[in-house]
Image (spheres, rainbow, N blue to C red):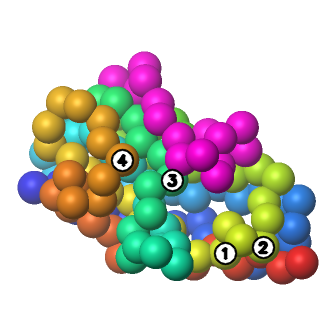
Amino acid sequence: QVRLVESGGGLVEAGGSLRLSCAASGPTFGTYVLGWFRPAPATARAFVAAISRNGGSTTYGDSVKGRFTVSRDNTEEMMYLQMNSLKPEDTAVYYCAARSRLAQSTGSSAYDVWGQGTQVTVSS
């Protein structure tokens, strides 16, 4: 089973950018759909973005569309989340997750493996 470790979080001013990384270890990285989640007032793990196995298809939560970009490098076994035009409401712990089934999903319960999270803080 793949293991996931996030990095790249930190403190940034509103309007700034950060790039989060998710490093995977274990076999068959390319067989997993990957996603990013963060806590929200109504849920512990709100959907941020997801990317298909080969990186050809992506999905975004409404609050981040047009500002965040998810990508992956299956050769390096890495996933990234480029976050631009950050807002104070983007402040959260960001988790990467892996799903062993084919279809992307926006539901946290659909993901099998989770990282420990990385803190992003956006100051106003």
Q: Give the magenta range.
A: 54-69
CA–CA distance in space, label 3 to label 2: 15 Å
Badge 3 marks a residue whose secondary structure is strand
Query: Which is more N-terminal, label 4 or label 1?
Result: 1
Q: Is residue 88 left or right of residue 98?
A: right
> Mark 3 — residue?
48
Mark sitting earlier along the chain (3/2) = 3
Crowding around mark 2 (Cα neighbors within 10 Å: few <14, some 14 to 19, many 20+) is some
Specify the amino acid type for callout 3: Val
The residue singled out by tag 2 in the image is 88
Q: Which residue is mark 1?
A: 91
- Closer-to-camera residue (61/17): 61
Residue found 71% across the figure and 59% down from its top: 18
Tag 2: amino acid: Pro
Quadrant of the image containing the C terminus: bottom right
Residue 2 within the segment the image draws in magenta: no
Q: Say which element carries label 2.
A: helix
Which element is circle 4 on?
loop
Main secondary-structure element of the magenta-colored stretch: loop
Residue 123: x, y in percent? 84, 79
The residue singled out by tag 4 in the image is: 106
